[in-house]
Image (cartoon, grey):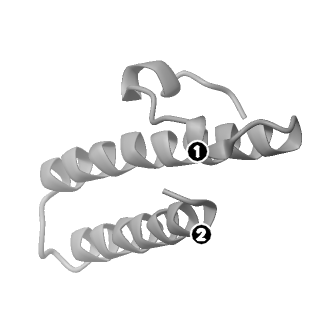
């Protein structure tokens, strides 16, 4: 994925988060479902942000950004911004 594709995916996931919260508020889904789906989205978002940061760092240091790779959610979840 290139930078634009990653940013588009992040935007789509943020939109999905809003829809989930709206669905919970309107009673379309229960809090357990919302919590599970939000957890999945948050892990995917963490991975996308990490990939984007990797690509930007590689570009900054003259490396090939295409060498960046998606790291496991378990690895990127604990990062502090």
* Residue 41 % position (x, y): 34, 51
For the residue pair 16 and 64, the one nearer the viewer reads as: 64
- In the rendering, at what x and y percent does residue 22 appear? 32, 76
The numbered mark at residue 41 is none
Q: Residue 13 in the image: x percent, y percent?
A: 40, 64
Q: Is residue 35 left or right of residue 41?
A: left
Residue bearing the label numbered 2 = 4
Q: Residue at 57% across / 65% down in the picture?
A: 7
- Upstream in sequence: badge 1 or badge 2: 2
Q: Residue at x 12, y 60 (%)?
A: 30
User: Relative to 55, is 2 above or below?
Assistant: below
Q: In the visual, does 79 lie left or right of 37?
A: right
Give above or below for 79 relative to 18: above
In this image, 48 relative to 49: left or right?
A: left
Q: Label 2's element?
A: helix
Residue at image location 28% in from the left, 68% down from the top: 20
Question: Nearer the viewer's eye, disc 1 or disc 2?
Answer: 1
Crowding around mark 2 (Cα neighbors within 10 Å: few <14, some 14 to 19, many 20+) is few
Residue 24, placed above or below residue 70: below
Instruction: Report the side of 53 relative to 26 (left or right).
Output: right
- Helix, strand, or loop for circle 1? helix
Give the residue number, with chain letter if any, for mark 1. Answer: 66
Q: Quadrant of the C terminus?
A: top right
* Front one among 35 and 5: 5
């Amino acid at each position: 994925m290139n930078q634009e594709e990653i940013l588009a995916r992040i935007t789509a996931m943020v939109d999905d988060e809003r829809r989930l919260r709206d669905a919970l508020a309107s009673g379309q889904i229960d809090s357990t479902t919302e919590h599970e789906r939000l957890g999945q989205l948050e892990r995917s978002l963490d991975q996308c942000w990490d990939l984007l940061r990797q690509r930007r760092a590689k570009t900054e240091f003259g490396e090939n950004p295409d060498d960046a790779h998606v790291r496991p959610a378990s690895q990127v979840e604990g990062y502090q911004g």
